[in-house]
Amino acid sequence: FATTAIPNKRGVITKSIKKAVFYLTKGDVVAIPTETVYGLAANIYNESALKKIFEIKQRPFFNPLIVHIDSVESLDKVAKNVPEKAYLLAKNFWPGPLTMILEKNKTVSDIVTADKNTVAVRVPNHPVALELIKKMGVPLAAPSANPFGSISPTTAKHVENYFKHSLDVILDGGMAEKGIESTIVGFKKGEVVVYRLGSISLEMLELVVGNVKVIVNSEKHPIAPGMLEKHYAPRTPMMMSSNPLHTAFNLIGKNIGLLVFEGQHISKDYYTEVLSPKGDMEEAAKNLYAAMHKLDTKGFDLLIAEKFLDIGIGKSINDRLSRACIRETNFTPNNIFI
Ligand code: TXA
Ligand code: MG
């Protein structure tokens, strides 16, 4: 991956929150743990630090960042006219993997929001992230800590592999508990709209707010044909199948790695990453990106991933897998909720 190599960075993995505070305070970008995936964090009030995030990640400036706060009480620092349903969702899911798109306060930099009048906010459910935000006393903007388009990191080591030359500090908080990104919702005319499937399932949301509307670009329902974004993608080509072993049998002559859910039908003829031997979809989500990272280092011609049932978090896993399978990109500003 071509990442911007800023000289003299050491990319040291540390457990010292004090060190992270030191670097963030002097305007640096620091990798931080959250319960979903690792993030590349900066002080939302330091514009040069915010710009560094985009530079390091090679992310287009029109793609806005998520703001991380320590509690719902801090929401007024970044958002205004917050709807009642947002407070209801916050009460049920914060701290946790739910990001809400709200009207922004003018104090939030246009760099964070990519000139939009909205801001994306969440309270991460990770003790290290929470302590860090509290110690800083300011919200932290953080996208996932991967180069634009590639597999998200769920361990400090994944971040090191990507960015050791462009970061000074990688704050280690262990392996991310949830393993896939937060669910993103917004509010339109009193209705809750889901813009990104994620760690909180649609079923869980609906238990709290009733029916939700889903507006995500997906393979089955592209908002505009040819505009699907390749994302969360290994360098090795990947495809999906409801029976990976069977699909592999039919592709003779290819060096294939398999990514499967429970691994009931595995064959010693194929290297296989099993996501949850006990068949737990939450555990599968937690292990998903680490397994993809691992498969990507093995030099296969092709990876075949098992399609999950489209229920609960299985639907979010399928979303990530299908985006990882897309090879051609046609990225436009209308297509950023990914
Ligand atoms: O779990 C997560 O959400 C992780 C951790 C680090 O918190 N963060 C994350 O950030 O996944 P990122 O940047 O990889 O994805 C954020 C998504 C992007 O697709 C972006 O377009 C969308 O949130 N987003 C951010 N602000 C927005 C806004 N004001 N309106 C619409 N979409 C927004
Ligand atoms: Mg991301």
Image (cartoon, rainbow, N blue to C red):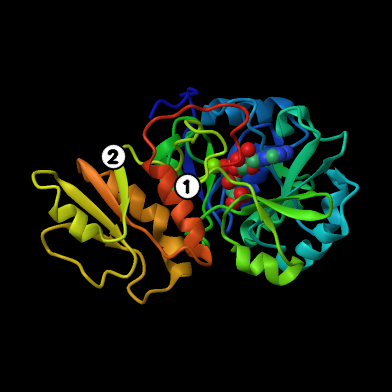
In the foreground, 144 or 92: 92
Quarter holding ligand 2 = top right
Residue 272's tag is: none
Q: Is residue 277 left or right of residue 230?
A: left
Whether 6 is drawn above or below 23: the answer is: above
Tell me residue 301's x, y (percent). 20, 40
Which quarter of the figure has residue 287? bottom left
User: Residue flagged by tag 1: what amino acid is it?
Assistant: Lys
Classed neighbour count for the residue bearing mark 1: other residues with Cα under 10 Å, few (<14), some (14–19), many (≥20): few
Tell me residue 314's x, y (percent). 47, 63
Q: Circle 1 sits in a helix, a strand or a loop, which is it? A: loop
Quarter occupied by the N terminus: top left
Instruction: Read off the residue under disc 1.
Output: 220
**Ligand 2 under 8 Å from disc 2 Cβ:** no
In the foreground, 190 or 54: 190
| Furthest residue toward right | 81
- What residue is at 25 percent from the left and 58 percent from the top? 244
Whether 56 is drawn above or below 302: the answer is: above
Quarter occupied by the C terminus: top right
Tell me residue 90's x, y (percent). 77, 62
Residue 174 visible within the image: no
First along the sequence among labels 2 and 1:
1
* Badge count: 2
Which quarter of the figure has residue 131? bottom right
Q: Circle 2 sits in a helix, a strand or a loop, which is it? A: loop
Instruction: Read off the residue under disc 2.
Output: 236
In the foreground, 87 or 220: 220
Tell me residue 13's x, y (percent). 48, 47
In the foreground, 209 or 162: 209
- What residue is at 51 percent from the left and 57 percent from the top? 316
User: Residue flagged by tag 2: what amino acid is it?
Assistant: Thr
Which quarter of the figure has residue 134? bottom right
